[in-house]
Image (cartoon, grey):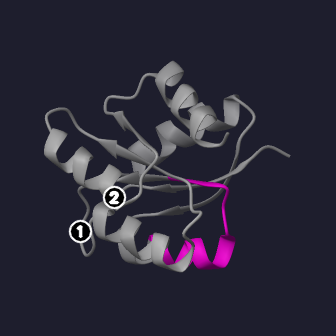
Amino acid sequence: MGKRVLIVDDAAFMRMMIKDILTKNGYTVVGEAENGTVAIEKYKELKPDLVTMDITMPEMDGIIAVKEIKAVDPAACIIMCSAMGQQAMVIDAIQAGAKDFIVKPFQPERVIEAVSKALV
């Protein structure tokens, strides 16, 4: 069984794209969440090896969710996903504890590179 991943994005098609890229490369997607609030609950429940976290979501954005997950588990491994032109948010995310970020639209090679680097 591959490393266990939790995918967090408010867009179902984005979760599907990431899931497809990861499963084709030997990762196991253990859960999905559509916002930061659900992400924190699922993280506590599933204890994944890695989280892919969208930044802009309803209810709770990805940066707050990263801080909350890091408070629960300082060793949490999180990669942010952002649309183009959100550099300031990406910096906030890294400062909040994210290991890396990938930019939408996703390039499969970049997703796998970020995930494998983060899990070292």
Q: Is residue 70 left or right of residue 10?
A: right
Whether residue 63 appears in magenta in the rendering, the answer is: no
Q: Dominant secondary structure of the magenta stretch?
A: helix
Q: Can you say whether 119 is above or below 66 in the image?
A: above
Q: Tell me if residue 49 is in the magenta stretch.
A: yes
Residue 38 % position (x, y)? 44, 75
Q: In the rendered image, which residue does mark 2 sit on?
A: 10
Q: Residue at x 47, y 77 (%)?
A: 71
The answer to whether 21 is drawn above or below residue 7 in the figure is above
Numbered disc total: 2
Residue where numbered disc 1 is placed = 58
Residue closest to the eye, 103 or 87: 87
The amino acid type of the residue labelled 2 equals Asp
Q: Secondary structure at mark 1?
A: loop
Range covered by the magenta-colored residues: 39-51
Residue 60 occupies quadrant = bottom left
Q: Which mark is residue 32?
A: none
Q: Position of residue 120 (x, y in %)?
A: 67, 39
| Residue 18, x across and y down, in percent | 51, 39
Q: 43 left or right of 49?
A: left
Could you tell me which secondary element the residue under label 2 belongs to?
Answer: loop
